[in-house]
């Protein structure tokens, strides 16, 4: 359990980086005079999309070649570098570079963390431990959004401000900033300081982890291949190809929606929903509390129930949320609350949880992390392209929100069908047993 918690901090920092950027997106836009196109680029190269995609394919192969522990020894140092650039940013290129470096670090850590958790779990609690790691993915945004709400500046120079905004004013005054958008953006800078501190703690804990026994056994048996050989095996073995198509298809269609919600949700609430920055963050805090509670229930039952129908239930909540958007809308507080509840329920029974579990089960230890890196690269890379296109579909002030919602709904229905039909029967089986059933004695 201790190792699961240490590794799960990677999920905390992954989601935390995405939501920290999202919660302060409007503040950075005002401070640097950014357009919706600039925001699209920030999303595209961040931990939400391309940055994580690049990091995942690198980290997956490094974790298989040099071990899971090698990732934990150095990766958090890269994360802290990226976060430091963001919190010190005074130009758009500096902000963009910080988002990119942070995203790469997140991507490097994700395949290793999901692989390590599965390989260090007993057969009866593999799903539970994946669920616990996903709770960290929910706790991160919750803490970040609460902090963002407390530090929120007054809207348009008037109205209520966060309870801790005087602290923002005090910190900013040390740097000679006392008013205007330059003062307001210090709210976001302080949020990123909190991520820097957590990353440092994660680095201290993760560098002390023991190496995965399954990786050590694979290395000792001579199963470990060169990076190029592993890459070739992934795309020439028909069993691997089917697994990649299933997992990437299921995860991609869901993540195209989730990536937009993860980065643009507060911005959407403020433009399409008409909320203030403080109220948008507060509503999102409520959603993440629902996600945490639902994820806890998920982690307790995932190893005991039919996973196919649990998957179906989770994605149906997401489908219903976007049906609501298209039929009732989210311009009323009632619509916003129901949408937030439904999206929170689907986030607790998340497609990402099933992806993390099944992706670590369906591939052998010799390239388990590399396979996840390839799929994560595909998913987050295409999500980057979608993020760039979404801002033009959505419009500067949300005028294209209905068109975007139709696309979101179609993507979620596709994920629902792929995941429900293709769900593997792996519950209650060891990783070695699953590998032998799928690949034989090779």
Image (cartoon, helix red, strand yellow):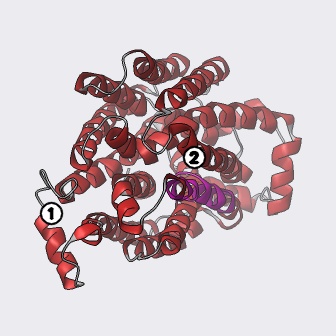
Tell me: residue 130, above or below residue 354.
Answer: below
Instruction: Name the quadrant containing residue 224.
Output: bottom right
- What residue sits right under mark 1 in the picture? 165
Say left or right for 98 vs 87. right
Among numbered discs 1 and 2, the one appearing first in the sequence: 1
Label 1 element class: helix
Q: CA distance from mark 1 to mark 2?
A: 31 Å
Say left or right for 251 vs 202. right
The answer to whether residue 304 of the structure is visible from this angle is no
Tell me, for residue 103, which label it has, or none.
none
Q: Looking at the picture, tell me which residue is in the foreground, 148 or 316.
A: 148
The answer to whether residue 87 of the structure is visible from this angle is yes
Label 2 element class: helix
Percent from the top left, x then y, of residue 158?
Answer: 14, 54
Tell me: residue 76, above or below residue 220.
Answer: below
Q: Which residues are magenta?
A: 38-60
Percent from the top left, x then y, of residue 298?
Answer: 39, 29
Count of numbered labels shown in the rendering = 2
Percent from the top left, x then y, of residue 442?
Answer: 84, 42
Residue neighbourhood size for the residue with mark 1, other residues' Cα within 10 Å, grouped as few (<14), some (14–19), many (≥20): many
Q: Looking at the picture, tell me which residue is in the foreground, 12 or 266.
A: 266
Give yes or no for residue 231 being in the magenta stretch.
no
Q: Looking at the picture, tell me which residue is in the foreground, 260 or 286.
A: 260
- What residue sits right under mark 2 in the picture? 387
């Amino acid at each position: 359990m201790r190792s699961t918690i240490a590794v799960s901090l990677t999920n905390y920092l992954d989601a935390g980086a995405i939501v920290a950027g999202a919660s302060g997106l409007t503040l950075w836009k005002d401070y640097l005079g950014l357009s919706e196109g600039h925001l699209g680029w920030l999303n595209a190269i961040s931990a939400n999309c391309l940055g994580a995609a690049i990091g995942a394919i690198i980290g997956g192969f490094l974790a298989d070649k040099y071990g899971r522990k090698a990732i934990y020894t150095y990766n958090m140092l890269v994360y802290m570098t990226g976060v430091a650039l963001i919190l010190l940013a005074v130009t758009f290129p500096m902000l963009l570079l910080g988002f990119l470096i942070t995203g790469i670090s997140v991507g490097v850590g994700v395949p290793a963390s999901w692989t390590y958790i599965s390989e260090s779990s007993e057969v009866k609690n593999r799903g539970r431990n994946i669920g616990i790691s996903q709770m960290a993915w929910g706790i991160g945004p919750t803490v970040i959004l609460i902090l963002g709400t407390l530090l929120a500046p007054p809207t348009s120079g008037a109205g209520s401000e966060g309870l801790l905004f005087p602290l923002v004013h005090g910190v900013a005054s040390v740097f000679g900033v006392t008013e205007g958008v330059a003062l307001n953006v210090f709210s976001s800078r302080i949020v990123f300081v909190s991520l820097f501190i957590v990353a440092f703690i994660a680095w201290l804990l993760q560098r002390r982890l023991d190496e995965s026994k399954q990786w050590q056994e694979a290395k000792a048996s001579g199963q470990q291949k060169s990076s190029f050989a592993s890459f070739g095996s992934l795309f020439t073995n028909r069993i691997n190809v089917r697994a990649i198509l299933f997992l990437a298809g299921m995860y991609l269609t869901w993540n195209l929606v989730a990536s937009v919600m993860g980065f643009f949700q507060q911005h959407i609430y403020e433009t399409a929903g008409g909320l203030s920055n403080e109220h948008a963050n507060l509503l999102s805090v409520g959603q993440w509390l629902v996600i945490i509670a639902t994820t806890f229930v998920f982690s307790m039952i995932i190893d005991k129930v039919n996973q196919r129908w649990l998957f179906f239930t989770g994605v149906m909540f997401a489908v219903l949320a976007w049906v609501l958007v298209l039929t009732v809308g989210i311009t009323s507080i009632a619509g916003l609350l129901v949408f937030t509840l439904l999206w929170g329920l689907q986030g607790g029974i998340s497609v990402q949880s099933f992806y993390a579990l099944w992706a670590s089960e369906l591939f052998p230890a010799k390239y388990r992390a590399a396979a996840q890196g390839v799929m994560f690269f595909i998913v987050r890379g295409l999500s980057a392209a979608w993020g760039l296109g979404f801002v033009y579909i959505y419009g500067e002030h949300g005028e294209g929100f209905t068109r975007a919602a139709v696309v979101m709904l179609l993507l979620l229905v596709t994920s629902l069908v792929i995941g429900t039909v293709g769900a593997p029967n792996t519950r209650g089986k060891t990783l070695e047993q699953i590998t032998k059933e799928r690949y034989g004695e090779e």
